[in-house]
Image (spheres, rainbow, N blue to C red):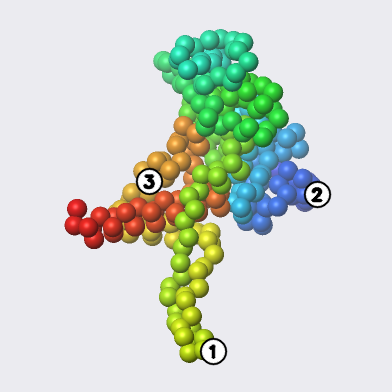
Amino acid sequence: MSTALVQFNPDQLRIVRETVAKGTSAEQFALFIEVCKVSGLNPFARQIYAIVRGGVMTVQTSIDGYRLLAERSGRYGGQIGPEWCGDDGAWKDVWLADAPPVAARVGVLRKDFERPVWGVAKYKSYAVSSNALWQKMPDTMLAKCAEALALRKAFPSEMSGVYTKEEMDQADRDVVDIPAVVVEAAPVEQPSTNGHVAPPPVAAQNVPDMAAILALCEEVYSPGKWPSVKAKLFDPEKYGDLADEMLSETQRIRARNALLKRKADVAAKAASGK
Protein backbone atom coordinates (compact mmCIF):
# COMPACT_ATOMS: atom_id res chain seq x y z
CA MET A 1 0.00 0.00 0.00
CA SER A 2 1.63 3.20 -1.18
CA THR A 3 1.34 6.61 0.45
CA ALA A 4 1.44 10.02 -1.21
CA LEU A 5 4.65 11.94 -0.82
CA VAL A 6 4.53 14.55 1.93
CA GLN A 7 5.07 18.09 0.63
CA PHE A 8 6.25 21.18 2.55
CA ASN A 9 5.97 24.88 1.83
CA PRO A 10 8.88 27.27 2.64
CA ASP A 11 7.42 28.30 6.03
CA GLN A 12 6.99 24.67 7.04
CA LEU A 13 10.56 23.86 5.99
CA ARG A 14 11.85 26.70 8.17
CA ILE A 15 9.87 25.47 11.17
CA VAL A 16 11.09 21.90 10.71
CA ARG A 17 14.71 23.08 10.38
CA GLU A 18 14.43 25.11 13.61
CA THR A 19 12.71 22.41 15.67
CA VAL A 20 12.85 18.69 14.85
CA ALA A 21 15.92 18.99 12.56
CA LYS A 22 17.94 21.49 14.56
CA GLY A 23 21.70 21.37 13.94
CA THR A 24 21.53 19.73 10.52
CA SER A 25 23.63 20.96 7.62
CA ALA A 26 21.98 21.97 4.36
CA GLU A 27 22.74 18.56 2.83
CA GLN A 28 21.57 16.68 5.93
CA PHE A 29 18.35 18.68 6.08
CA ALA A 30 17.65 17.99 2.41
CA LEU A 31 18.15 14.27 3.03
CA PHE A 32 15.90 14.39 6.10
CA ILE A 33 13.10 16.05 4.13
CA GLU A 34 13.38 13.41 1.40
CA VAL A 35 13.05 10.67 4.05
CA CYS A 36 9.95 12.44 5.41
CA LYS A 37 8.45 12.59 1.92
CA VAL A 38 9.15 8.97 1.04
CA SER A 39 8.16 7.51 4.41
CA GLY A 40 5.05 9.66 4.77
CA LEU A 41 5.90 10.35 8.44
CA ASN A 42 4.93 13.81 9.68
CA PRO A 43 7.63 15.82 11.51
CA PHE A 44 4.96 18.21 12.82
CA ALA A 45 3.34 15.28 14.65
CA ARG A 46 6.76 14.27 16.03
CA GLN A 47 6.55 11.04 14.05
CA ILE A 48 10.04 11.64 12.65
CA TYR A 49 12.97 13.87 13.56
CA ALA A 50 16.70 14.29 12.94
CA ILE A 51 19.42 14.00 15.58
CA VAL A 52 23.00 15.10 14.86
CA ARG A 53 25.75 13.40 16.85
CA GLY A 54 29.36 14.31 16.13
CA GLY A 55 28.37 15.84 12.81
CA VAL A 56 26.54 12.70 11.64
CA MET A 57 22.75 12.76 11.29
CA THR A 58 20.48 9.94 12.41
CA VAL A 59 16.84 9.93 11.30
CA GLN A 60 14.72 8.78 14.22
CA THR A 61 11.09 8.00 14.86
CA SER A 62 8.96 6.75 17.72
CA ILE A 63 7.80 3.15 18.00
CA ASP A 64 4.37 4.49 16.97
CA GLY A 65 5.96 5.75 13.76
CA TYR A 66 7.29 2.26 13.05
CA ARG A 67 3.85 0.76 13.68
CA LEU A 68 2.31 3.30 11.32
CA LEU A 69 4.77 2.39 8.55
CA ALA A 70 4.02 -1.30 9.06
CA GLU A 71 0.26 -0.69 8.97
CA ARG A 72 0.51 1.40 5.79
CA SER A 73 2.30 -1.44 4.01
CA GLY A 74 -0.93 -3.44 3.98
CA ARG A 75 1.00 -6.55 4.99
CA TYR A 76 1.14 -6.06 8.77
CA GLY A 77 -0.60 -8.89 10.63
CA GLY A 78 0.04 -7.89 14.24
CA GLN A 79 2.63 -9.23 16.63
CA ILE A 80 3.45 -11.79 19.29
CA GLY A 81 4.60 -10.53 22.65
CA PRO A 82 6.46 -8.73 24.01
CA GLU A 83 8.08 -11.37 26.19
CA TRP A 84 10.96 -11.06 28.65
CA CYS A 85 13.49 -13.45 30.17
CA GLY A 86 16.05 -13.49 32.96
CA ASP A 87 19.35 -15.35 33.21
CA ASP A 88 17.45 -18.65 33.09
CA GLY A 89 16.27 -17.98 29.53
CA ALA A 90 12.63 -18.70 30.40
CA TRP A 91 10.36 -16.34 28.42
CA LYS A 92 7.49 -14.65 30.30
CA ASP A 93 4.61 -12.51 29.01
CA VAL A 94 4.85 -10.16 32.00
CA TRP A 95 7.93 -8.99 33.91
CA LEU A 96 7.30 -8.73 37.66
CA ALA A 97 10.83 -8.82 39.09
CA ASP A 98 12.40 -5.64 40.46
CA ALA A 99 15.64 -6.36 38.57
CA PRO A 100 15.65 -5.53 34.84
CA PRO A 101 15.09 -8.39 32.37
CA VAL A 102 18.10 -9.81 30.58
CA ALA A 103 16.37 -9.74 27.19
CA ALA A 104 13.07 -9.01 25.48
CA ARG A 105 11.62 -10.38 22.26
CA VAL A 106 8.78 -9.52 19.91
CA GLY A 107 7.50 -11.47 16.92
CA VAL A 108 6.04 -9.48 14.01
CA LEU A 109 3.51 -11.13 11.72
CA ARG A 110 3.39 -10.38 8.01
CA LYS A 111 0.37 -11.51 6.01
CA ASP A 112 2.63 -12.88 3.25
CA PHE A 113 5.05 -14.69 5.62
CA GLU A 114 4.48 -18.17 7.00
CA ARG A 115 6.29 -17.51 10.28
CA PRO A 116 6.75 -14.50 12.57
CA VAL A 117 9.86 -12.35 12.29
CA TRP A 118 11.51 -12.12 15.71
CA GLY A 119 13.49 -9.28 17.20
CA VAL A 120 15.52 -9.98 20.36
CA ALA A 121 17.09 -7.15 22.36
CA LYS A 122 19.51 -7.69 25.22
CA TYR A 123 19.41 -5.29 28.16
CA LYS A 124 23.17 -4.79 28.28
CA SER A 125 23.19 -3.77 24.62
CA TYR A 126 20.62 -0.99 24.90
CA ALA A 127 20.17 0.16 28.50
CA VAL A 128 21.46 3.58 29.52
CA SER A 129 21.91 3.73 33.30
CA SER A 130 21.75 7.53 33.39
CA ASN A 131 18.41 7.66 31.54
CA ALA A 132 15.41 8.11 33.87
CA LEU A 133 13.06 6.06 31.68
CA TRP A 134 15.48 3.14 31.53
CA GLN A 135 15.74 3.26 35.31
CA LYS A 136 11.99 3.51 35.88
CA MET A 137 10.62 1.09 33.25
CA PRO A 138 13.45 -1.05 31.82
CA ASP A 139 11.05 -3.77 30.67
CA THR A 140 8.99 -1.34 28.58
CA MET A 141 12.02 0.35 27.03
CA LEU A 142 13.64 -3.00 26.16
CA ALA A 143 10.40 -4.26 24.63
CA LYS A 144 10.31 -1.20 22.35
CA CYS A 145 13.85 -2.00 21.15
CA ALA A 146 12.89 -5.61 20.43
CA GLU A 147 9.75 -4.51 18.57
CA ALA A 148 11.74 -2.02 16.49
CA LEU A 149 14.25 -4.72 15.52
CA ALA A 150 11.45 -7.08 14.51
CA LEU A 151 9.55 -4.44 12.53
CA ARG A 152 12.66 -3.35 10.63
CA LYS A 153 13.48 -6.98 9.77
CA ALA A 154 9.92 -7.60 8.59
CA PHE A 155 9.59 -4.33 6.64
CA PRO A 156 13.10 -3.34 5.49
CA SER A 157 12.03 -1.26 2.49
CA GLU A 158 9.69 0.85 4.63
CA MET A 159 12.04 1.37 7.59
CA SER A 160 15.59 1.19 6.23
CA GLY A 161 17.75 4.01 7.59
CA VAL A 162 15.20 5.10 10.23
CA TYR A 163 15.77 4.19 13.88
CA THR A 164 13.71 4.53 17.05
CA LYS A 165 14.75 6.74 19.94
CA GLU A 166 14.95 3.77 22.31
CA GLU A 167 17.42 2.02 20.02
CA MET A 168 19.59 5.12 19.72
CA ASP A 169 19.68 6.05 23.42
CA GLN A 170 22.92 4.09 23.64
CA ALA A 171 24.58 5.98 20.76
CA ASP A 172 25.97 8.69 23.03
CA ARG A 173 27.22 5.99 25.38
CA ASP A 174 29.49 4.36 22.77
CA VAL A 175 32.35 6.75 23.49
CA VAL A 176 33.29 4.66 26.55
CA ASP A 177 33.95 1.68 24.28
CA ILE A 178 36.63 3.47 22.27
CA PRO A 179 40.10 2.18 23.18
CA ALA A 180 42.64 4.77 24.21
CA VAL A 181 44.85 4.68 21.13
CA VAL A 182 47.22 7.56 20.45
CA VAL A 183 48.01 8.15 16.78
CA GLU A 184 51.38 9.75 16.24
CA ALA A 185 52.08 12.16 13.44
CA ALA A 186 54.82 11.45 10.94
CA PRO A 187 58.20 12.28 12.52
CA VAL A 188 59.39 15.77 11.61
CA GLU A 189 62.74 16.91 12.92
CA GLN A 190 62.58 20.37 14.44
CA PRO A 191 65.93 21.82 15.61
CA SER A 192 65.70 23.57 18.95
CA THR A 193 67.61 26.66 20.01
CA ASN A 194 70.13 24.61 22.00
CA GLY A 195 71.12 22.51 19.00
CA HIS A 196 69.21 19.37 20.00
CA VAL A 197 66.50 17.87 17.84
CA ALA A 198 63.05 18.28 19.36
CA PRO A 199 60.82 15.19 19.53
CA PRO A 200 58.18 14.85 16.85
CA PRO A 201 54.77 16.25 17.78
CA VAL A 202 51.90 13.92 18.61
CA ALA A 203 48.74 14.58 16.64
CA ALA A 204 45.38 14.81 18.30
CA GLN A 205 43.01 11.92 17.71
CA ASN A 206 41.25 13.34 14.66
CA VAL A 207 37.99 11.96 13.33
CA PRO A 208 38.52 9.90 10.16
CA ASP A 209 36.19 10.09 7.19
CA MET A 210 34.75 6.95 5.61
CA ALA A 211 37.22 7.05 2.71
CA ALA A 212 40.13 6.79 5.17
CA ILE A 213 38.43 3.95 7.06
CA LEU A 214 37.73 1.99 3.86
CA ALA A 215 41.30 2.47 2.63
CA LEU A 216 42.69 1.29 5.98
CA CYS A 217 40.38 -1.72 5.96
CA GLU A 218 41.61 -2.73 2.50
CA GLU A 219 45.20 -2.33 3.68
CA VAL A 220 44.66 -4.45 6.80
CA TYR A 221 42.40 -7.09 5.25
CA SER A 222 41.50 -7.01 1.56
CA PRO A 223 39.06 -5.22 -0.77
CA GLY A 224 35.41 -5.95 -0.01
CA LYS A 225 35.94 -6.94 3.64
CA TRP A 226 34.50 -3.76 5.20
CA PRO A 227 30.87 -5.03 5.50
CA SER A 228 31.97 -8.06 7.56
CA VAL A 229 34.39 -5.95 9.65
CA LYS A 230 31.63 -3.40 10.33
CA ALA A 231 29.26 -6.18 11.38
CA LYS A 232 31.80 -7.42 13.94
CA LEU A 233 32.40 -3.93 15.31
CA PHE A 234 28.73 -2.92 15.38
CA ASP A 235 26.46 -5.90 16.01
CA PRO A 236 23.50 -5.75 13.56
CA GLU A 237 21.24 -7.10 16.31
CA LYS A 238 22.03 -3.94 18.27
CA TYR A 239 22.51 -1.30 15.58
CA GLY A 240 20.42 -2.71 12.74
CA ASP A 241 21.56 -2.27 9.14
CA LEU A 242 23.92 0.60 9.91
CA ALA A 243 24.77 2.44 6.70
CA ASP A 244 28.26 3.96 6.40
CA GLU A 245 26.87 7.48 6.30
CA MET A 246 25.02 6.83 9.59
CA LEU A 247 28.21 6.07 11.55
CA SER A 248 28.67 8.62 14.31
CA GLU A 249 31.93 10.41 14.99
CA THR A 250 32.73 8.13 17.93
CA GLN A 251 31.88 5.04 15.87
CA ARG A 252 34.25 6.10 13.08
CA ILE A 253 37.02 6.66 15.62
CA ARG A 254 36.28 3.26 17.11
CA ALA A 255 36.48 1.61 13.68
CA ARG A 256 39.74 3.39 12.84
CA ASN A 257 41.31 2.40 16.17
CA ALA A 258 40.26 -1.23 15.82
CA LEU A 259 41.78 -1.39 12.33
CA LEU A 260 45.01 0.24 13.54
CA LYS A 261 45.24 -2.27 16.38
CA ARG A 262 44.74 -5.13 13.92
CA LYS A 263 47.43 -3.67 11.66
CA ALA A 264 49.87 -3.42 14.59
CA ASP A 265 49.10 -7.00 15.69
CA VAL A 266 49.76 -8.33 12.19
CA ALA A 267 53.04 -6.41 11.98
CA ALA A 268 54.16 -7.66 15.39
CA LYS A 269 53.33 -11.24 14.45
CA ALA A 270 55.27 -10.93 11.19
CA ALA A 271 58.26 -9.45 13.00
CA SER A 272 58.33 -12.32 15.48
CA GLY A 273 58.27 -14.88 12.68
CA LYS A 274 55.18 -16.64 14.03
Label 3 CA crowd tier, 10 Å (few <14, some 14–19, many 20+) = some
Residue wearing tag 2: 11
Check disc 3 and report its element: helix, strand or loop.
helix
Q: Is residue 82 in sight in this rendering?
A: yes
Q: Are marks 3 and 1 in contact (CB under 8 Å)?
A: no
Where residue 145 appears, as percent x and y from the top left, is 57, 27
Q: Residues under labels 3 and 1: Cα distance?
A: 48 Å
Kindly identify the amino acid type of the residue bearing the numbered disc 2: Asp
Which amino acid, mark 1? Thr
Q: Earlier in the sequence, mark 3 or mark 1?
A: 1
- Going from N to C along the chain, the mark reached first, 3 or 2, is 2
* Quadrant in which the N terminus appears: top right
| Residue 137, quarter of the rendered image | top right
Q: Which residue is at a point 52% across and 21% down the rendered structure image?
A: 102
Q: Residue sitting at 48 percent across and 50 percent down?
A: 179
User: On the picture, is 113 further left or further right than 93?
Assistant: left
Q: What residue is pinned by disc 1?
A: 193
- Camera-nearest residue between 60 and 42: 60
The residue identified by callout 3 is 229
Indicate whether 123 appears above or below 188: above
**Cα gap from disc 2 to disc 1, whole angstroms:** 62 Å
